[in-house]
Amino acid sequence: MSSNRPRYGFDRYSSVRIAYGPSFAPDGQHVSFISDITGVPQAWILDLATSRIDQLTLFNERVSSAVFSPTGVNLALSMDPGGSERHQIWTLDMESLAAKKLTVGDDWIRVFGSFSPSGESLCYASNERDEKFFDIYTSALASGEKNLVYQNDA
């Protein structure tokens, strides 16, 4: 049985790149997102007025999310060292593009939650107290001070 449909080789499908995880900046003029166009997923920004796209991060590790703070001053980044799926939380200063690791220790899983309305702190889930349970923490961006706000023992 013959078909007129074109046949495509494996290479065509294995080289497909992705973009995901959009986050609008508070100014409504920019969108951050993750793309693996360079080979390793990194954070990018799209200027909606000009359609210009710029790479924000250039880590050896994959970036899995990039979320704008309510002020637009920072992005919260999630990365998992060595592809371990034990995500850690970083902040990226949008003016200097300086990245700062907010969570300490790579042995636990951290899941970004949200920024506070002021953008001065954020919350996340972590299994650092007990690997069987995820608790909720807040962390101040300036000092890195963290607080356990909900302990889950069930």
Image (spheres, helix red, strand yellow):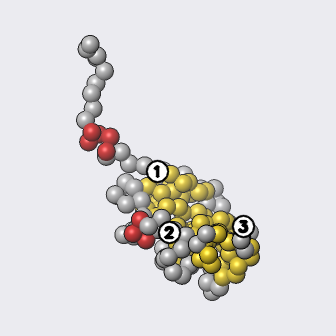
Mark 2 and mark 1: span between their CA atoms? 21 Å
Mark 2 and mark 3: span between their CA atoms? 21 Å
Q: Quadrant of residue 145?
A: bottom right
Q: Quadrant of residue 58?
A: bottom left
Mark 3 and mark 1: span between their CA atoms? 36 Å
**Which residue is rendered at x = 36% and y = 69% of the image?**
60
Identify residue for label 2: 86
Residue type at numbered disc 2: Arg
Q: Say which label, 2 or 3, has the lower sequence index.
A: 2
Which image quarter is the N terminus in? top left
Q: Position of residue 93 (x, y in %)?
A: 54, 74
Identify residue for label 1: 19
- Front in this rendered view, residue 51 or 98: 98
The answer, for residue 115, to whether it is visible in the render is: yes
Badge 2 marks a residue whose secondary structure is loop
Q: Say which label, 2 or 1, has the lower sequence index.
A: 1
Q: Is residue 152 left or right of residue 16?
A: right
**Which residue is rendered at x = 31% and y = 46% of the image?**
15
